[in-house]
Amino acid sequence: MTRKCSNCGAYLIEGDFTCQVCGAKQDISNFKTKKDQPPTKTEKNNLPMIAGILLIIGGIIALITWLSLTFTDPVAIEEIVMQVSGSLSVENPADFADLLYQWLVICGAAGIALSILVILGGILAIKRIYWGFTIVCSILGLFLIGPFLISSILSLIAIIMIVKAKNDFT
Ligand SMILES: [Zn+2]
């Protein structure tokens, strides 16, 4: 809290009634304490926080989905393949089921890793740090898919918000 001389504008010492620079007597009414910096309205944009929440929700949904797919019982897959093998004209259903299961595990592992990255991106968005990394995570979120594409859609919305809110990141 500093006061200024009503005559020359020099800063006054706390409690001083005469200016140290020009000697002008200070009017009591001018002694209203003036803050050095006017209170700047820090209007914080909510976009990073909303985007972060969307990424975390999408990431968690995708994580659960990919986890359940990865740990699907291979026997169950084989049964399904057996049931539909007639209409798919699969030559060797057992081999096909095996291949399908392997792909599911590989895709599942990739999906789990991606989901974790996207959740991390969501946390960074809420904290408003590492914009570049956050945008990469949200773009990766497009590949999360999830039930009814929900995780990809949430990531897409988050990307738009994070791009718009670039200046809010530090
Ligand atoms: Zn003065």
Image: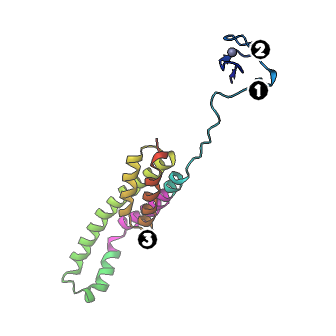
Instruction: Report the residue at 43% width, 61% height from top.
Output: 155
Task: Inspect the magenta stretch and tell me whether residue 69 lies in it.
Answer: yes
- For the residues labelled 1 and 3, the Cα–Cα distance comes to 62 Å
Magenta residues, start to end: 54-75
- For the residues labelled 2 and 1, the Cα–Cα distance comes to 15 Å
Instruction: Report the residue at 53% width, 52% height from top.
Output: 49
The answer to whether residue 5 is above or below residue 44 is above
Which quadrant is home to the N terminus? top right
User: Which color mode does the image show?
Assistant: rainbow
Q: How crowded is mark 3: few (under 14 residues within 10 Å), some or many (20 or more)?
A: few
The answer to whether residue 119 is above or below residue 147 is above
Amino acid, disc 3: Pro
Residue 140 location (% of width, % of height): 36, 57
In primary-sequence order, the first of circles 1 and 3 is: 1
Secondary structure found at label 3: helix
In primary-sequence order, the first of circles 2 and 3 is: 2
- The residue under label 1 is 32
